[in-house]
Image: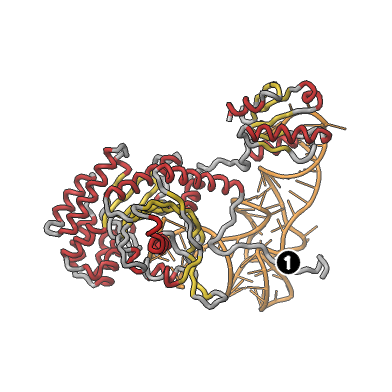
RNA sequence: GUGGCUGUAGCUCAGUUGGUUAGAGCACUGGAUUGUGGUUCCAGAUGUCGCGGGUUCGAGUCCCGUCAGCCACCCCA
């Protein structure tokens, strides 16, 4: 077959899957590095699990919807397998399997891609990286508090300020539903309730009556609580009154109160913590605290970090009870958000220094200079061919290098070089010997 | 999975009731300038009009299908 007649295959990517060019991959890796650093600073340790699991491990944990969205197939050995939908269910399997080796409480982080067969939209992909962090093996609210602190710290470390956590507790909702004798229809009711912000109370009431089979009075009672507004203290007070007589409801209120009070005392601005008894979240495994995180400037992109407490997640794999609490940063959604907010710097090189190449004969000298910079911890690149200087500088410019080093024969002989500060459009003449130290103090 | 909108150069878009060889800006490449970058000037290259089929003497334009993106639902990071 000749080249001319060869049938070309159209290069393309699957719907909802994406390529990452350096200009996106560099900030993406920076995001991950920030998450990693924050997780470790709280004592979370990394783990990894396979992308593919037996379907029976993954199915039926998050609800019917999640099962529908799972990529599932039969492998060559006739096994029924699926790609993980999130990192929490694999954690439950992992913890059940290795708990004896791990000991409790066990704090882990896990940054890895997950796959969902959803309709893609802005900030919604079929393959995306989640950065999960969880504390398993303790029922203490203190763990819930720490998870909220980590969420707050990660976003702060990324330089974000205009964000807030919406916090609720499933026990509050369950207490109310118990009181109204609606516990059996909780899934349908919570699903309707979750839309309150979008569709308004009338539509929610209608959906509760039609989909969940509640009476108008029951629906109104749910809505009455969900629509409580005010400061966190006021909301807690009113909810507590409404849930009078419900033990589980009061437990939820007490947990929320401790969470918010402690976080505020520890220095988190109260405006970033909003108790919102209308958020429910669709994942079926949550039993206590629930978190969602929104950017003030981009609420429509959805929650960029969500999670909650689950007290029974491992019950399907183990007789031992395995409570836990955790949350997940939606790295790719966060990246899309930062991009839309114009917070992604257009840099396409990870190294700050470009060394211009003039004298092919002295290539070894250029290369060893670059190495001496690298040894000093400074990323450096030698231009690959002795092109015109203007073109080499143009390349440096476009790639976002911060410095260019210019050395020709005379400079080599004299032991000097010109260091250009590309952003400031200035330059200085220094000896080659002091270059690494000079750059180290500039970087 | 359901419904809607969109698809023309690398990017943002123009393109008349269907009519010859599909345009602009930005970006790109080269030169002005063989050792000094973001500005300027000159020159140049670029498209199976997303893809496939249909109607027509003739389709970027109309119809159907398909793929992709966006939006709403569902759900969610």
Image point (75%, 69%), residue name = A7
Residue A86 in the image, given as x and y percentages of width and height: 44, 61
Quick check: A410 left or right of A317? right
Crowding around mark 1 (Cα neighbors within 10 Å: few <14, some 14 to 19, many 20+) is: few
Residue A236 in the image, given as x and y percentages of width and height: 20, 49
Question: If the image is split into quadrants, where does the N terminus of chain A sit?
Answer: bottom right
Q: Which residue is mark 1?
A: A8
Image point (19%, 46%), residue name = A234
- Quarter location, residue A402: top right
Q: Secondary structure at mark 1?
A: loop
Residue A37 visible to the viewer: yes
Residue A352 in the image, given as x and y percentages of width and height: 62, 35
Residue A150 in the image, given as x and y percentages of width and height: 38, 45
Q: Nearer the viewer, residue A116 or A149?
A: A149
Relative to A327, does residue A85 appear above or below in the rendering?
A: below
Q: Nearer the viewer, residue A361 or A245?
A: A361
Relative to A412, does residue A361 appear above or below in the rendering?
A: below
């Amino acid at each position: 077959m000749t080249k001319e007649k060869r049938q070309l295959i159209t290069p393309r990517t699957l719907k909802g899957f994406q390529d990452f060019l350096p200009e996106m991959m560099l900030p993406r890796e920076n995001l991950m590095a920030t998450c990693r650093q924050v997780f470790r600073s709280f004592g979370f340790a990394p783990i990894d699990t396979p992308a593919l699991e037996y379907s029976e491990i993954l199915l039926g944990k998050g609800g019917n919807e999640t099962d529908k969205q799972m990529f599932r197939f039969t492998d060559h050995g006739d096994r029924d397998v699926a790609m993980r939908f999130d990192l929490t269910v694999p954690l439950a399997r992992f913890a059940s399997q290795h708990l004896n080796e791990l000991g409790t409480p066990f704090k882990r982080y896990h940054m890895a891609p997950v796959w969902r067969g959803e309709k893609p939209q802005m900030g919604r992909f079929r393959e995306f990286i989640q950065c999960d962090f969880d504390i398993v093996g303790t029922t203490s609210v203190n763990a819930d508090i720490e998870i909220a602190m980590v969420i707050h710290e990660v976003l702060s470390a990324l330089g974000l300020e205009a964000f807030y956590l919406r916090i609720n507790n499933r026990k509050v909702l369950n207490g109310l539903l118990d009181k109204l004798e609606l516990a059996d229809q909780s899934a349908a009711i919570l699903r309707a309730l979750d839309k309150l912000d979008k569709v308004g109370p009338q539509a929610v009431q209608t959906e509760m009556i039609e989909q969940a089979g509640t009476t108008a009075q029951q629906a109104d009672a749910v809505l009455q609580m969900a629509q409580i507004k005010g400061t966190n203290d006021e909301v807690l007070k009113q909810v507590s009154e409404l849930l009078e007589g419900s033990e589980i409801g009061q437990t939820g209120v007490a947990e929320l109160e401790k969470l918010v009070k402690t976080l505020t005392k520890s220095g988190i601005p109260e405006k970033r913590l909003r108790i919102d008894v209308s958020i429910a979240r669709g994942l079926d495994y949550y039993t206590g605290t629930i978190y969602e995180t929104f950017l003030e400037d981009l609420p429509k992109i959805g929650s960029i970090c969500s999670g909650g407490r689950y007290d029974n997640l491992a019950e399907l794999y183990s007789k031992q009870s395995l409570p836990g609490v955790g949350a997940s940063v939606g790295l790719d959604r966060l990246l899309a958000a930062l991009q839309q907010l114009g917070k992604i710097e257009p840099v396409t090189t990870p190294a700050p220094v470009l060394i211009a190449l003039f004298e092919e004969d002295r290539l070894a000298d250029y290369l060893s200079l670059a190495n001496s910079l690298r040894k000093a911890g400074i990323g450096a690149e030698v231009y690959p061919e002795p092109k015109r200087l203007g073109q080499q500088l143009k390349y440096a410019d476009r790639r976002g290098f911060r410095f260019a080093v210019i050395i020709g024969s005379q400079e080599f002989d004299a032991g000097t070089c010109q260091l250009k500060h590309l952003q400031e459009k200035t330059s200085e003449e220094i000896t080659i010997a002091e270059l690494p130290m000079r750059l180290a103090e500039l970087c």
